[in-house]
Amino acid sequence: MFHQVKQMESVIKMLLEEFDDLTLQDVKDIRNTLSWDLDDCPYLSIYWRLLAMNADLQETVLLLVQTFSQRPVDKMQELLSRMRRPDLEFALIKSTEKKSVVGKWKSAPIQKVRNNPDQRSKFII
């Protein structure tokens, strides 16, 4: 439990530092983007909570981390992509040291095949 709290704390700190220079309009855009995905209930819940309190960046990041505790950085990347803000998305990816712009990791068998052509016959594709 202590490790999870420390991990959440570090994610919050990283997101706040990375987006420290966002404008008020950028924060509003993030809130509005949360409302676009009507099929995902956590989005609606968090959107209305943010709207009700006229949330600033810190409150927005805290609620994102609380709602999407397993993958808040991926959700933020998704939001930035929907907002068509590749500059912020790239900065976030760079700060989290992920290897791809979309934030998706390839499955281990595919990576093995690509990295070791001799093992291709072991995998049925």
Image (cartoon, grey):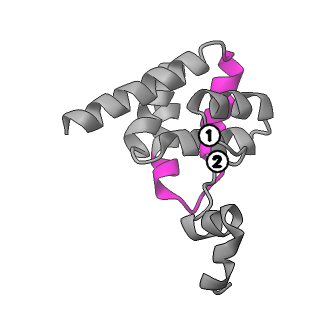
Q: Mark 2 points at which residue?
A: 103
Relative vertical location of residue 85 with respect to residue 45 in this rendering, above or below: above
- Rendered location of residue 24, percent (x, y): 66, 17
> Distance between the Cα atoms at labels 2 and 1?
7 Å
Q: Which residue lies furthest to the front in this view?
A: 118
- Report if residue 89 lies within the magenta region: no
- Label 1: state its secondary structure: loop
Taking 17 as reference, is 7 left or right? left
SS majority, magenta: helix
Horizontal placement of 41 versus 104: left or right? Answer: left
Q: What stretch is highlighted in magenta?
A: 22-45
Q: Position of residue 14 (x, y in %)?
A: 50, 23
Tell me, yes or no, if residue 33 can be seen here. no
Q: What residue type is labelled 2?
A: Gly
Given the image, on which type of amino acid does mark 1 rest? Lys
Looking at this view, name the residue that lies furthest to the bottom.
124
Q: Kindly identify the residue that appears in the image at 60 percent across and 34 percent down.
A: 97
In the rendering, at what x and y percent does residue 103 appear? 64, 47
Q: Do residues under tags 2 and 1 come within 8 Å of each other at their CB atoms?
A: yes
Extreme residue toward the left, this view: 1
Verify whether residue 43 appears in magenta. yes
Circle 2 — which element?
A: loop
**Most distant residue in the top direction:** 21
Question: What's the residue at 65%, 12% (across, down)?
Answer: 21
Query: Quarter holding the N terminus?
Result: top left
Residue 42 placed where, x, y %? 46, 52
